[in-house]
Amino acid sequence: MQVVSSTEFATQQEKFFLMAHHQRVLVQSGNYTYRIMPEPIVVEQMVLQPDEKLRNAITGDELLEGIYQDLETFFAGK
Protein backbone atom coordinates (compact mmCIF):
# COMPACT_ATOMS: atom_id res chain seq x y z
CA MET A 1 0.00 0.00 0.00
CA GLN A 2 1.26 3.46 -0.95
CA VAL A 3 -0.01 6.61 0.81
CA VAL A 4 0.82 9.92 -0.89
CA SER A 5 -0.04 13.55 -0.33
CA SER A 6 -2.33 15.35 -2.74
CA THR A 7 0.63 17.51 -3.82
CA GLU A 8 2.78 14.48 -4.59
CA PHE A 9 -0.12 12.88 -6.46
CA ALA A 10 -0.72 16.04 -8.50
CA THR A 11 2.91 16.19 -9.64
CA GLN A 12 3.24 12.46 -10.43
CA GLN A 13 -0.25 11.36 -11.46
CA GLU A 14 0.84 8.92 -14.17
CA LYS A 15 3.18 7.13 -11.78
CA PHE A 16 0.43 6.59 -9.21
CA PHE A 17 -2.22 5.62 -11.76
CA LEU A 18 0.08 2.91 -13.09
CA MET A 19 1.00 1.84 -9.56
CA ALA A 20 -2.70 1.46 -8.70
CA HIS A 21 -2.91 -1.49 -11.10
CA HIS A 22 -0.60 -3.48 -8.82
CA GLN A 23 -1.10 -2.13 -5.32
CA ARG A 24 -3.45 0.01 -3.27
CA VAL A 25 -2.77 3.75 -3.65
CA LEU A 26 -4.24 6.21 -1.15
CA VAL A 27 -4.14 9.97 -1.61
CA GLN A 28 -4.24 12.00 1.61
CA SER A 29 -5.80 15.46 1.27
CA GLY A 30 -6.59 17.37 4.44
CA ASN A 31 -8.94 15.27 6.55
CA TYR A 32 -9.87 12.98 3.65
CA THR A 33 -8.23 9.94 2.08
CA TYR A 34 -9.05 8.82 -1.46
CA ARG A 35 -8.31 5.41 -2.96
CA ILE A 36 -7.22 5.25 -6.59
CA MET A 37 -8.95 2.28 -8.20
CA PRO A 38 -8.49 1.49 -11.88
CA GLU A 39 -11.68 0.39 -13.57
CA PRO A 40 -11.96 -0.63 -17.22
CA ILE A 41 -14.38 1.40 -19.29
CA VAL A 42 -17.08 -0.65 -20.96
CA VAL A 43 -17.88 1.24 -24.13
CA GLU A 44 -21.22 -0.50 -24.60
CA GLN A 45 -22.51 1.06 -21.39
CA MET A 46 -21.56 4.53 -22.64
CA VAL A 47 -23.34 4.27 -26.00
CA LEU A 48 -26.83 5.71 -25.94
CA GLN A 49 -29.57 3.74 -27.56
CA PRO A 50 -31.60 5.56 -30.23
CA ASP A 51 -34.73 7.12 -28.81
CA GLU A 52 -37.36 9.65 -29.82
CA LYS A 53 -35.08 12.61 -29.03
CA LEU A 54 -32.40 11.26 -31.34
CA ARG A 55 -34.93 10.68 -34.13
CA ASN A 56 -36.06 14.32 -33.79
CA ALA A 57 -32.52 15.71 -33.75
CA ILE A 58 -31.20 17.92 -36.53
CA THR A 59 -27.76 17.96 -38.12
CA GLY A 60 -25.24 20.74 -37.70
CA ASP A 61 -25.92 21.89 -41.27
CA GLU A 62 -29.66 22.07 -40.57
CA LEU A 63 -28.94 24.09 -37.42
CA LEU A 64 -26.76 26.56 -39.32
CA GLU A 65 -29.36 26.91 -42.07
CA GLY A 66 -32.01 27.75 -39.46
CA ILE A 67 -29.71 30.28 -37.80
CA TYR A 68 -28.98 31.96 -41.15
CA GLN A 69 -32.70 32.15 -41.93
CA ASP A 70 -33.43 33.63 -38.50
CA LEU A 71 -30.66 36.22 -38.94
CA GLU A 72 -31.94 37.18 -42.38
CA THR A 73 -35.47 37.58 -40.99
CA PHE A 74 -34.21 39.60 -38.03
CA PHE A 75 -32.12 42.04 -40.12
CA ALA A 76 -34.78 42.33 -42.83
CA GLY A 77 -37.21 43.62 -40.20
CA LYS A 78 -34.95 46.55 -39.24
Image: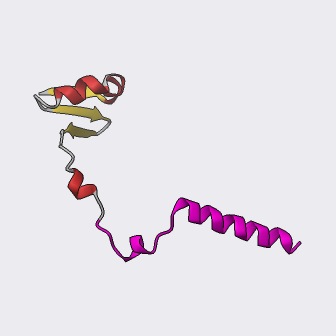
Q: Position of residue 17 (x, y in %)?
A: 23, 30
Q: Quadrant of the C terminus?
A: bottom right
Q: Is residue 60 left or right of residue 49?
A: right
> Which of the two residues, 38 or 77, is positioned nearer the viewer here?
77
Q: Is residue 75 left or right of residue 11?
A: right
Q: Position of residue 28 (x, y in %)?
A: 26, 33
Eyeballing the image, is 77 above or below 23? below
Quadrant of res 54:
bottom left
Q: Quadrant of the N terminus?
A: top left
Question: Which SS does the magenta portion mostly show?
Answer: helix
Q: Is residue 10 left or right of residue 57?
A: left
Disc count in the image? 0
> Which of the two residues, 43 or 23, is positioned nearer the viewer here?
43
Residue 70, magenta (yes or no): yes
> Which of the two residues, 42 or 13, is positioned nearer the viewer here?
42
Eyeballing the image, is 59 above or below 15? below
Q: Position of residue 38 (x, y in %)?
A: 18, 39
Eyeballing the image, is 26 above or below 39? above
Residue 6, magenta (yes or no): no
Q: State how the image is colored.
A: secondary structure
Quadrant of res 8:
top left
Question: Magenta region: which residues?
Answer: 49-78
